Image (spheres, rainbow, N blue to C red):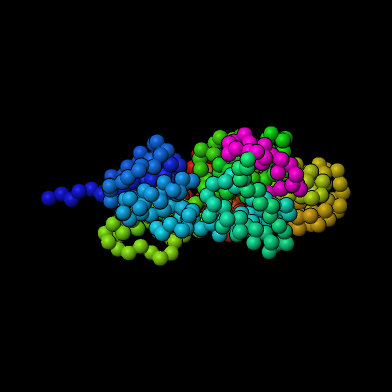
Amino acid sequence: MTLSRKRVLFASPWWHAEIVNGTLRHASEHGWHVDLQTCLSGKLPKRWDGDGIITVFGTDIGAFKRLLAQARCPAVSLNNNYPEIDIPRVCQDDTVAGQLAAGHFLERGFTSFAFYSHGASPQSTAMRLASFSEAIAQAGHTVEPILWKPTRRSSDNWLDRQQWLASKLVSLPKPLAVFALNDLAAVEVIEACMSQSLAIPRDVAVLGMLDMAIFRHCTTVALSSIRVDFDAITRTACDLLSDMMAGKPQPDHPILFPPSEIAVRQSTDTYAARSPVVAKAVRFMHENYASPIGVEQIVQASSRSRAGLFMAFQSDLGMTPGQMLSRIRVDQAKRMLRDTRVKVYAVAHDCGFGDVVNLHRAFKQATGLSPNAYRKAQREKSPRERQD
């Protein structure tokens, strides 16, 4: 006698490739049949007669409530929106995300900050903004919330939102660091900046969240983003739903996975200098780090004396020009080691170190790991193919 397969509804009108693929992969390990009609149609069914539900709460919360009440089966959510609905949550830790974002921008010398949400995910918006603002406040600065809410004069469409967002970005002090709710919101910031001829990342640095390939590849400015372990989240959610369908009680608190790293790309690949002299020198380094330049060439490009430039760097960024050049090169090396399969000797050449020995020395000093060990650790964290 063969047991009937469990039927599980994937109730999300938002198609997120990693969440969908991870859910299906781990659901197949349990032998379930997964209904994807909501993803394909963008509409929630009025009824569900299956064994379980995995959901990503969207904006139509009334329809979600009616579906859950009618289905009367175990359900698990993959986000933390609408906490008033009593089902278990397995998702990223938004508090840690805000702290990561703050540390990333503060390390790069920013003193002007904003948080942008395009109106989605109210709970995540509130939690990421609060955590980001608290960490920035501890460093003696404030965060400007840019939170879209349609009014009688503006409908909820992309064009109205873009015009409103552009006016907000223009009015804030530069250089500006913007942490966006997610990658979609981050791309909206980039598009608004382009419309106002604001340079990214020199005028506005933009950090997203979720690291979704579709948004990494839709803009010519490669997007920095906070990575989330969707494989672990979807595996845990499927295991939890399996337990609940077997009659085990649901947990009494959310299961949170802290994001561990930021994929640094062009949109935040800068250091905010208030001094025009330092800004000019840092820009020269970013444009020429792959070449065999050193401190003398940086001094010449700055049109200042060596002593004057060193004093300006210490006052503005708290480091020497040589230390800044090494940091820029190490950042580029980390990106290549993480996101490509280029050989280590080619990374050393392309990042301006000249040879593997110099790369190894600088990289080990900055990260505590050798280049090969760093690459291995990154691939173990995320088994997906990286082809940025």
Q: Position of 213 compared to 353: left or right?
A: left
Residue 75 locus on image (x, y percent): 36, 54
Frontmost residue, 251 versus 238: 251
Q: Magenta segment, which residues?
A: 153-177
Residue 102 locus on image (x, y percent): 64, 56
Residue 155 lies in the magenta stretch: yes
Q: Position of 234 compared to 123: left or right?
A: left
Residue 86 locus on image (x, y percent): 41, 59
Name, please, the residue furthest toward the bottom: 252
Frontmost residue, 59 versus 171: 59
Frontmost residue, 56 versus 155: 155
Frontmost residue, 8 versus 288: 8
Q: Could you say which quadrant of the image residue 10 lies in?
A: top left
Report whether residue 333 is seen: no
Q: Position of 51 compared to 147: left or right?
A: left
Residue 353 locus on image (x, y percent): 65, 46
The residue positioned 63% from the left and 38% from the top of the image is: 154
Report whether residue 82 is seen: yes
Name, please, the residue furthest toward the front: 152
Give the mark count.
Answer: 0
Residue 164 lies in the magenta stretch: yes
The residue positioned 31% from the left and 54% from the top of the image is: 72
The residue positioned 87% from the left and 49% from the top of the image is: 305
The residue positioned 58% from the left and 36% from the top of the image is: 157
Q: Could you say which quadrant of the image residue 243 lies in?
A: bottom left
Name, please, the residue furthest toward the left: 1
